[in-house]
Image: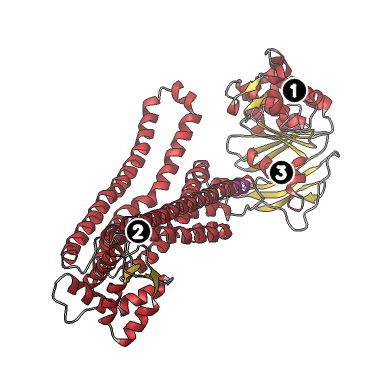
Amino acid sequence: MKNLFKTLMNYKGTALLVLLLMAGQAFCEMNLPQYTQNLIDTGIQNKGIEHILPEAMTDSEYDALSSGMSESEKALFEDAYEEGGKEDAGQDLYYRKSGLDDEALDELDKKLLIPVVKRYSALQGEKVPDDIDVSDRNALAMGIAYAADCDEAAGLDILAIQNRFMLRCGGMMLLMSLLVMGFTTLISFLAARVGANIGRDLRGRLFSNVMSFSNSEMDKFHTSSLITRATNDIQQVQMTSTMMLRMMLFAPCIATWSIIKVYQTHAHMNFVIVTGVIAILLMVSLLFAIAMPKFKIMQTLIDGLNAISREILTGLQVIRAFGQERLEEKKFDEANGKLYRNQLFVNRAMITMTPMLMIIMYGLTVWITWISAERIDSGTLQVGTMTAFIAYAMEIVFSFLMIASMAIFLPRAGIAADRVYEVLETETSIKDTDDATILERGSGKTVKFEHVSFRYSDAEKNVITDIDFEAKPGETTAIIGATGSGKTTIVNLIPRFFDATEGGISINGRDVRDISLSSLRACIGYVPQKGILFSGTVADNIRWGDEKASDEDVREAADIAQATEFIDAHQDRFDRAVSQGGANVSGGQKQRLAIARAIARKPDILILDDSFSALDMKTDLALRRALTDKRGDQTRIIVAQRVGTIIHADQIIVLDEGRIVGKGTHDELMRDCEIYRETAISQLGEAAV
């Protein structure tokens, strides 16, 4: 979870801006129920009249009302009015309310409510109440009814007053709605932008870090897992980060403001909301306990499905050749079925949240309405207040639901973030030292192994032991041995795909660990066992060795690699499209293009790791001769299975179970090395002798 919040904190400036916008949105949303309450209670029920003091009074009513007041009340009352004069001949004088603000009028409502209610009761022929509670809504309703009668008697248009109030409230509701829309749009834009930036940055950082990994780190993180982390896991982090900005910050704002507004309604039904919140928390806690274990294993199941899918797609030709489609389909269905059942369980658990939430919400609404009905009938509660209370209650319920929902999604996103940061925080074991030097290109390079041993980190014994030889410029050093004898491991140590466990490897007398990786690998042309091509054209793949290579350099590299023949046979020649992985070229063509790519680099050290296995003997011989003739100053290290490929090498290293058992030319080894002699005779017959 820490990594999830750490990612979001990189955008704390935007998050703070979003929080401020959310405060504005919450303020506007919380005022909408209040305006609805005013429309119902004041606009409809009270005809748009907000206070008990009439806007205008006839002089006779003015005198009658003031006569029932105490001296202090009369002083307040007289200060609130001024004479208005006559409108028509014969009409009584009338008084108009002086320009008082709402705060002053609210204060007068409290202080003058008793004489106003007594006067209204007398006019209606009702018994004057003995004691009047200024907080009684019935008393306030009587005062407002008195104000309406007085305004009408003074000749004011009550309908116009009502319409003005309704238009004012409706206009404020429209303004608040527009502001909410504006805030929501900005918040959504910023949240989506932050989420997209998080996804982009994490993918970029993850890819950059993976590109620096040595083979040791690549063995630790399987390819299928890295793909899942770079796609699904980062998508989870991105989506949840957006939700956090939209919901996790907004929910507390709404909840806090709604609670304040609920208190201000004085509806005295807070226990209803507390019950609803407790019900939601219990529901989410139950779902959390049921679904969370499944959430935790979902990413592992996705890793497994990706691994099987990748294996099947990569080995599709072999699967078809051996007729094992049903077996592989069964393996895929098993992995797919596990993920399906896991996701189905989680989705079913989460889907139950919606109907359960609806039950809680509508149950609360019915409960509030049932309680309010009696209070409205007794006059202690108004319809608009009930409506506002229901709206605020729903806001509180939704805010707690959002918080609870995030509590479900956060752990899964936290797991995904931890998996991503596990890759980001893994440092490659192969890196430059602080005082790494530059290895200049263009000169002869002597590669020397001095008693080198290597063991994988999780292995119990060495892969190679006490390897000691020297490969000189202008010479071909060949390495031969049985499968698993450590041939590829030796050549992988030169460009530092691994570092030697014991001993040292030097180039021109300088330890490879003291040379910067970029300059070291710039001097090496490497052709792996499996020829790997990239989508693009033939020329693009050859230029992988040197992106600045001219057309002449590309053709020369193809000539040396004996690839020109099949390249020119195609109508597009060097512009021929190569599909991903080189699926549209043969194995021998793929190997020759991979060799041409290394030759185009014009390296000082050329490493060919069993790169002639798919070539016929004629092409094999022509390629080796071309390398000697046109790149005679290179240090060439060739790993081979065929004796015929290395028979003319200047030096042949014979490996057996990770140790050197023979070293010398072909003739010397035929005389002194039994293992080599047996291998040569088995492949070449008597011609090897």
Query: Which residues are drawn in magenta?
Result: 204-209
Residue under label 1: 558
3 vs 2, front mark: 2
Of callouts 2 and 1, the N-terminal one? 2
Residue under label 2: 161
Alpha carbons under labels 2 and 1: distance apart: 93 Å
**How many marks on residues?**
3
The image position of residue 668, as x and y in percent, is: 75, 32
Q: Amino acid at mark 2?
A: Ile
Q: Amino acid at mark 3?
A: Ile
Q: Amino acid at mark 1?
A: Ala
Alpha carbons under labels 3 and 2: distance apart: 93 Å
In this view, the residue in front, 532 or 672, is 532
1 vs 3, front mark: 1
| Predominant SS along the magenta part | helix
In this view, the residue in front, 410 or 155, is 155
Secondary structure under tag 3 reads loop
Direction from residue 532 to residue 120 in the image, left or right: left
Query: What mark, if any, has residue 494 been given in the picture?
Result: 3
Within-10-Å neighbours for mark 2: few <14, some 14–19, many 20+: some
Within-10-Å neighbours for mark 1: few <14, some 14–19, many 20+: many
The image position of residue 327, as x and y in percent, is: 37, 29
Q: Is residue 272 above or below residue 532?
A: below
Q: Quarter of the image for the C terminus: give it.
A: top right
Viewer can see residue 646: no
Outermost residue toward the front?
89
Direction from residue 421 to residue 271 in the image, left or right: left
The image position of residue 458, as x and y in percent, is: 53, 52
Within-10-Å neighbours for mark 3: few <14, some 14–19, many 20+: many
